[in-house]
Amino acid sequence: MLVISSREFRENQKKYFDSVDGGEQVIVQRGKDRSYKLVPVTSEDACMTQEEFYAKVNRSLQQVREGKAHTLDLDKLDEFLGL
């Protein structure tokens, strides 16, 4: 694991991105109390714009209004989720 300063990261971004791509863990420290972990985005990560998010919420609300949604009590929800 590499722990570097934000200044070091700014000066050598390509080097550290390449390290992360190669499987190395990289932590960037910002000041005394803040740290950030560099993590590559994968195809499994859900990335959508705010507009796409609200469109999805609105479609779901429309499905509820049309009676296309189902309600579950907590026991049924646990069963549905396999808990």
Image (cartoon, grey):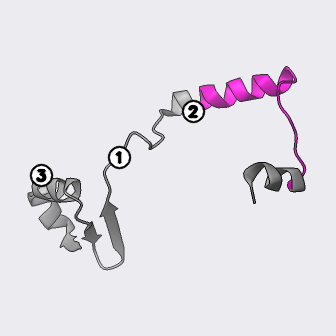
Q: Determine which residue is flagged by label 2.
A: 53
Q: Residues within 10 Å of mark 1 (few under 14, many from 20)?
A: few
Q: Which residues are magenta?
A: 53-74
Q: Which callout, 3 or 1, points at the residue further toward the start of the chain?
A: 3
Residue labelled with disc 3: 14
Of the numbered discs 2 and 3, the one sitting upstream in the chain is 3
Mark 3, secondary structure of its residue: helix
Mark 1, secondary structure of its residue? loop
Q: Which mark is residue 66?
A: none
Q: Residue 54: within the magenta?
A: yes
Specify the label residue 41 is tagged with. Answer: 1
Residue at (9, 58) in percent of width and height: 12
Q: Distance of mark 2 from mark 1, alpha carbons?
A: 18 Å
Q: Is 79 placed left or right of 57 in the picture?
A: right
Q: Quadrant of the N terminus?
A: bottom left
Instruction: Please name whichever residue, 58 or 67, is drawn nearer the observer in this view of the structure.
Output: 67
